[in-house]
Image: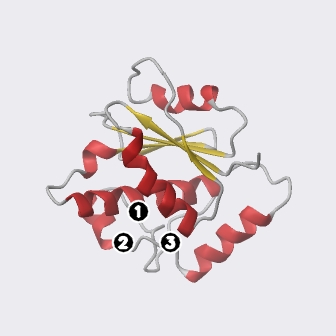
Amino acid sequence: MDLRVRLVPLEGMEARFLHPLAANVLEVIGGPVMVEPVPLAKKRPGDWVAALGAAFPDDRWVVGVGFLSRGPLIAFGGGRVAVVRADRLIDSDGRRWLSRLMKAVNHAIGRLVGLEACPSDCVMGPVDTVQALDARPRFFCDGCRKALEASLRAPGSPPG
């Protein structure tokens, strides 16, 4: 299977909440995308990246999403694994929370593909705070979209 993205619920995140994120990834990045819970022992925030990489060694990109309570908004490792902290994105408006999660996952995948920070009105702009994430669109600008598509088309290209 040419699986591009695996979304994994972590720490308190139910798999059902990742299905809208999978639809978002399918729309924005393309497929295939899979949501798969995996039984992993509770980890310290920095250990999730290594645990996911070990659990899914053959996947191109793995993004874990959970309520981790510590660590950066998005953590990266190994050029193909990212972890998004859903607890940093909580809002009383569930739609805003979902929008933030979508943007954070799209940004994480862009970084895994090798995209850098973008000065345009793009999901690849800085997202180090919730306010910065709220100000960003969910989609990639034309330049980042072209770079993303080139990376996805490249035969045998290394992950990330």
Q: Relative to residue 73, is residue 96 depicted above or below?
A: below
Q: CA distance from mark 3 to mark 2?
A: 11 Å
Please tell me which residue lies in front, 10 or 23. 23
For marks 3 and 2 on the same chain, the one whose residue lies earlier in the sequence: 3
Q: Where the N terminus falls, by quadrant?
A: top right
Q: Which residue is mark 3?
A: 118
Which corner quadrant of the image does residue 9 belong to? top left
- Asked whether the beta carbons under mark 2 and mark 1 sit within 8 Å of each other, the answer is yes
- Determine the residue located farthest toward the right in the rendered image: 155
Instruction: Judge left or right: residue 114 versus residue 25.
Output: right
Amino acid on which disc 1 is placed:
Lys
Q: Relative to residue 7, is residue 120 depicted above or below?
A: below
Question: Closer to us: mark 2 or mark 1?
Answer: 1
For marks 2 and 1 on the same chain, the one whose residue lies earlier in the sequence: 1
Amino acid on which disc 3 is placed:
Cys
Instruction: Judge left or right: residue 43 versus residue 60.
Output: left
Q: Which residue is located at x 44 percent, y 17 percent?
A: 41
Q: Which residue is mark 2?
A: 136
Question: Neighbour class for label 1 at 10 Å: few (<14), some, many (≥20)?
Answer: many
For marks 1 and 3 on the same chain, the one whose residue lies earlier in the sequence: 1
Amino acid on which disc 2 is placed:
Arg
Q: CA distance from mark 1 to mark 3?
A: 14 Å
Q: Which residue is located at x 49 percent, y 33 percent?
A: 37
Q: Which residue is mark 1?
A: 103
